[in-house]
Amino acid sequence: MDGHHHDHGHGTELRSVNRAFIVGIMLNMAFVAVEAVTGFWTNSLALLSDAGHNLSDVASLALSLVAFRLAKVKATANYTYGFRKATILVALLNAVILLLVVGSIVYEAILRFNRPQPIPGATIALVAFIGIIVNSLTAYLFMRNKESDLNVKGAYLHLAADALVSLGVVVAGVLLMYTNWLWLDTVISLVIAVVIVVSTWSLLTDSLRLSLDGVPPNVDLAIIKSKVLALPGVADFHHIHVWAISTTKNALTAHLVISNAVDLKMVGQIKDQVKHALEHLNVHHSTIEVHTVDGDGEEVNCQLADTHKH
């Protein structure tokens, strides 16, 4: 191979994500405490709902940080891929936690419709404004690396949605200062529930898909096949299976059929070219069984001592 590497600045990225998780957990935990105390004091369902949402985000960030660390643990005899799969399971767990939060918010909101409570709008608006600052700042920490990992993307989306939710609560607080619309607190809490569902749905479906070893969203089988078939000496590429090892790493197994016109000494080089092409298509670990075609047109294993190291 030509020594091409795909991990430029990877160490810096890991440190940046790790720092973002730690800072995000600390900031959001402090804000949850402020929001929860104020919510109980003012009897505001909107603030309590948002506090519950933010608390679930703290739990999600903590779980994601644990998964992030586990993904770096080296493989063992019993866990040959290490603990990378934990990142997928945590992403799924985070989505489920958020949906449970939605259920509790909706349940309480339905009860509140029948008995609206007097609420100090100015206090709600002030606390929610602090929420905008905290969530926006924390989301910004994840923005640069949000496309590199499903858990990082999930953290970014949730925190960005939280900032929008806090903006909605600010508006509700200001309106409550000048009106007597007590039902507005309950309506805002339901809007928060809808925002959580919308922002969580893609995380839920993507993590469930990866948990079931479905083809990762960032992999296109049709493109993979066409790119490999376009390489010199490749006659066919089939029995392709792709799955996620983690939220950032994908694996593939396939059968590679070499053209009869190719010198068998070139098989190792062709195989390396295929693996190199796959790396550019978001496949980071590939196991390829090489075949040739006999005189009857039947595929046979290419029993070749491949001394070329990839």
Image: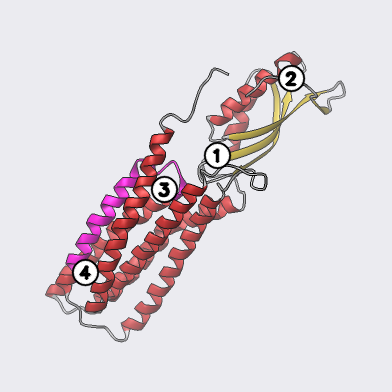
Instruction: Give the residue number, with chain letter if any, for mark 2.
Output: 259
Residue 266: quarter of image: top right
Q: Main secondary structure of the magenta part?
A: helix
Q: Residues within 10 Å of mark 1 (few under 14, many from 20)?
A: some
Could you tell me how many numbered marks the image carries?
4
Q: Position of residue 67 (x, y in %)?
A: 49, 51
Residues at marks 4 and 3, CA–CA distance in whole angstroms: 30 Å
- Choose the circle earlier in sequence order: 2 or 3: 3
Which type of secondary structure does the marked residue at label 2 adopt?
A: loop
Instruction: Answer with mark 1 or mark 3, whichever residue precedes in sequence.
Output: 3
Q: Which residue is mark 1?
A: 219
Residue at label 3? 152
Residue 77 % position (x, y): 67, 44
Q: Is residue 218 above or below residue 225?
A: below
Measure how far apart labels 4 and 1 are at the Cα level: 43 Å
Locate residue 131: give its quadrant. Answer: bottom left
**Residue 222 placement, left or right of 108:** right
First along the sequence among labels 2 and 4: 4
Task: Give the number of the mark in front: 2 or 3.
Answer: 3
Crowd band around label 2 with a 10 angstrom C-alpha radius: few (<14), some (14–19), many (20+): some
Vertical placement of residue 72 versus 129, above or below: above
Magenta part of the chain: 124-151
Separation (CA) of disc 2 from disc 3: 43 Å
Quadrant for residue 181, please give it. Answer: bottom left
Q: Report which residue position mark 4 lands on.
A: 172
Q: Amino acid at mark 4?
A: Ala
